[in-house]
Amino acid sequence: MKRKGLLIVLSGPSGVGKGTVRKEIFSQKNTAFEYSISMTTRSPREGEVDGVDYFFKSKEDFEELIKQDQFIEYAEYVGNYYGTPLQYVKDTLEEGKDVFLEIEVQGARQVRDKFPEGLFIFLAPPNLTELQSRIVGRGTETDDSVRNRMNEARKELAMMNLYDYVVVNDQIDLAVDKINAIVKAEHCRRTRVEKQYIAMLEEK
Ligand SMILES: Nc1ncnc2c1ncn2[C@@H]1O[C@H](COP(=O)(O)OP(=O)(O)OP(=O)(O)O)[C@@H](O)[C@H]1O
Ligand SMILES: Nc1nc2c(ncn2[C@@H]2O[C@H](COP(=O)(O)O)[C@@H](O)[C@H]2O)c(=O)[nH]1
């Protein structure tokens, strides 16, 4: 039987650096993960491309897709919908490829319920002051949006103990190395467990 791919979920508060870290991972030559592009009702930021950064949808279209059960998870986050397309993720895992999701915390909880065998990594900021200066420094949010995102962040940080691993994003390259090492170690661990199980069956 063909082995399924590993579902890797990177989550954490807005502005912690999930997108930056993910882009760095995907820029590496030897990366074997497939990135699942999310759908959102938020407007594109300058430079964002439909079908690359997100699939940008109207609220009506997104709600229709919810009705049709087309998401593994979706969440309303500071006034917009965000969701992960189900079919792409299922098909890609079935092909034996690892799928990488970069999503906020409510969504990650829903994925945990549906894919408990996934690998859940929480990206944490060194502290809240640094988190705020990263959101502000990115220059994409209004004062209101910064406040909302910081309020969400306080609640999200309280949920990090639900994850398999916590990686502090102090330095981008170190965070990337840690995530790559975690995935490698998880693959080895899962292979070892399978082998032990097969050996046990053969002994019987
Ligand atoms: N380790 C780091 N040190 C300093 N700045 C960083 C670090 N990681 C990311 N940043 C900066 O922080 C800002 C926010 O990063 P990014 O957009 O990747 O966050 P995010 O978690 O993907 O946010 P969102 O969830 O809102 O999409 C960016 O300006 C990025 O350059
Ligand atoms: N639950 C989901 N959250 C998602 C998804 N795609 C992105 N996100 C997260 O939303 C916030 C805001 O993103 P932004 O691009 O407006 O800054 C951030 O934490 C993203 O990681 C998704 O499919 N589902």
Image (cartoon, grey):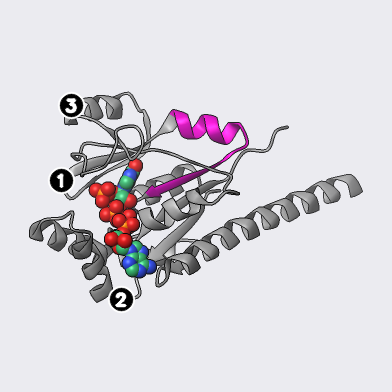
What kind of residue is marked 2?
Asn
Mark sitting earlier along the chain (2/3): 3
For residue 78, above or below residue 168: above
Q: In x, y percent, where is residue 45?
A: 21, 44
Within-10-Å neighbours for mark 3: few <14, some 14–19, many 20+: few
What kind of residue is marked 1?
Gly
Stretch of the chain drawn in magenta: 87-102
For residue 60, the mark is 3
Q: In x, y percent, where is residue 32?
A: 59, 45
158 left or right, relative to 136: right
Mark sitting earlier along the chain (1/2): 1
Identity of the residue drawn at 29% across and 36% down: 49
Question: Distance of mark 1 from mark 3, alpha carbons?
Answer: 14 Å
Residue on which disc 1 sits: 79
Residue on which disc 2 sits: 127
Please tell me whether residue 124 belongs to the stretch shown in magenta.
no
For residue 202, above or below residue 122: above
Q: In x, y percent, where is residue 18?
A: 37, 57
Please tell me whether residue 99 belongs to the stretch shown in magenta.
yes
